[in-house]
Image: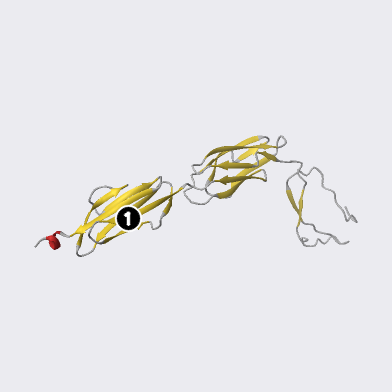
Amino acid sequence: MGGQTTCMIANLSAGMAYYFAATEYDKSGQESGYSNEVRYAAASSCTFSISPTANSSNSAGGTGTVGVATQAGCVWNANSSVSWVVITSNSLGTGNGTVNFSVLANPNGTSRTGTLTAGGKILTVNQTAAPQFSLTVAKAGKGNGTVTVNPTGGTFPAGTVVTLTAAPDGDSAFAGWSGACSGTAPTCKVTINSNTSVTGTFGPSLSKSMP
């Protein structure tokens, strides 16, 4: 209506964003272009809480749940900040609900922390490190040679598969393994699930021992 400089818009939905632009008319009825766009976010009446707010898991991993509490009709979603916390069901809900998730096994020798967010509230997930065990490699016998370890190191997370390779020098021969490895094949694989010892025995080569 001519001469009005204000306008009231009623019945905006809570939690929604609205965008407005206006034009104006002069006395001769000429309409202007649109004004700059203005954004208005109607206040939401929804409030959220979760329980629990923390989860602890051992290195083997496992499953967990977090409950979301809110008013009827209030929409929420859930997401994880790390790849090892996986939401298995109910990543989207309305009103009260429960998010189910799993924590994958930790293969590392250090503990780790991640978060899961539901309804804007944060669940902190703490996971312990994988147990660490030592590998001791020794050489025996009258011959000479080397034993290489792959991956390298002397301490490994539980479940690590380590390959040991024996290489005698030119005047020696590999005689065999003892300890966690056995046989005379130059390569042996061992799974580290406890403190482990392996011995490679080297003797003189047959060509050098013959007269």
Say which of 194 and 51 sits in front.
Answer: 194
- Alpha-carbon neighbours of circle 1 within 10 Å: few (<14), some, or many (≥20)? few
- Report x, y in % for residue 22: 79, 57
Q: Residue at x 37, y 53 (%)?
A: 136
Q: Which residue is drawn at 25% across and 62% down?
A: 144
Q: In this view, does 54 lie to the left or right of 150?
A: right
Say which of 137 and 104 sits in front.
Answer: 137
For numbered disc 1, what is the local secondary structure? strand
Q: Residue at x 82, y 47 (%)?
A: 9
Q: Is residue 169 above or below residue 58?
A: below
Residue ranking furthest to the left: 211
Task: Report the coloring of the rendering.
Answer: secondary structure
- Report x, y in % for residue 208: 14, 63
Say which of 110 and 200 sits in front.
Answer: 200
- Report x, y in % for residue 99: 60, 38
Determine which residue is flagged by label 1.
138
Residue ranking furthest to the bottom: 170
Residue ranking furthest to the right: 3
Q: Which residue is drawn at 24% across and 56% down?
A: 141
Please identify the quadrant where the C terminus is shown.
bottom left
Q: Is residue 51 above or below residue 183?
A: above
* Residue type, label 1: Ala
Q: Is residue 155 left or right of residue 12?
A: left
- Report x, y in % for residue 14: 76, 43
* Count of labels in the image: 1
